[in-house]
Amino acid sequence: MSTPTLSRTLLSSSPEETHRLGLKLGQVLQPGDFVGLVGDLGAGKTHLVRGVAEGAGVSRSEVASPTFAIVYPYRGRLPLYHADLYRLADYDELYATGFLDLVGGDGAVLVEWLDRIPKAAPREFLRITLRDAGEDSRELVAEAWGTRPAELLKAWLPTNR
């Protein structure tokens, strides 16, 4: 993989803060955006996803883990497609789900466990890696590949925050 166009690193001190960061990201998502999440079990991906969905105008009660459905569509101010690649073996299995038809479409795509099938990401995307930083703290490393993902990252995490 090439070098990211832009990257930012920040620390979240609680699950609630991780949720709020997701909320801010969801508020600036646009159709065609692709966000891949990477992190071990318990790294905070679910807290971030719930925040993103809420920020995109999805009712809290609708947000569920798509672990068994692979892709779960949400309707908010824009369509949000939440995918979980944890149980998939390879790219061919992902291809058979129809997931690739959603990429670059009418909504934003949010993918957990992108590291399991990195080829699922389009050429331009935002990747967020979450790491345990002790107790309830998490380090988030956001990396943008391409112009629109860099714009998304700047809108989400402006340098003057």
Image (cartoon, rainbow, N blue to C red):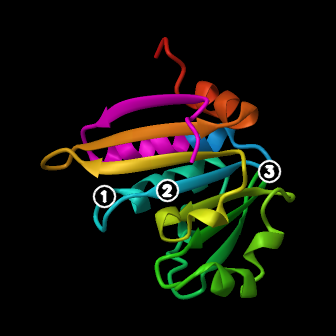
Q: Amino acid at mark 3?
A: Gly
Q: Is residue 72 above or below residue 92?
A: above
Q: Which residues are magenta?
A: 1-24
Which of the two residues, 148 or 46, is positioned nearer the viewer here? 148
Q: Which mark is residue 43?
A: 1
Magenta stretch: includes residue 20: yes
**Gap in Å between the C-alphas at discs 1 and 2?**
10 Å
* Residue shown at the point (28%, 64%) measured from the top left: 42
Front residue of 94 and 136: 94
- Residue at (52, 85) in percent of width and height: 89
CA gap, disc 3 and disc 2: 16 Å
- Mark 3 vs 2: CB contact within 8 A: no
Q: Residues within 10 Å of mark 1 (few under 14, many from 20)?
A: many
Which disc number belongs to residue 37? 2
Query: Can residue 62 be seen from the camera position used here?
Result: no
Task: Name which of mark 1 and mark 3 comes first in the sequence.
Answer: 3
Q: Please give the residue where the numbered disc 3 appears in the rendered image.
A: 32
Q: Position of residue 120 (x, y in %)?
A: 65, 66
User: What's the CA distance linking mark 1 and mark 3?
Assistant: 26 Å
Assign a secondary structure to mark 2.
strand
> Residue at 72% across / 49% down in the picture?
123
Amino acid found under the numbered disc labelled 2: Leu
Position of residue 127 measured from the top left corner of the image (x, y, whole percent): 54, 47
Q: For the residue carrying disc 2, how many other residues have a C-alpha within 10 Å: few (<14), some (14-19), or many (20+)?
A: many
In depth, the one of 120 and 148 nearer the eye is 120
Q: Secondary structure at mark 1?
A: loop
Mark closest to the chain's N terminus, 1 or 2: 2
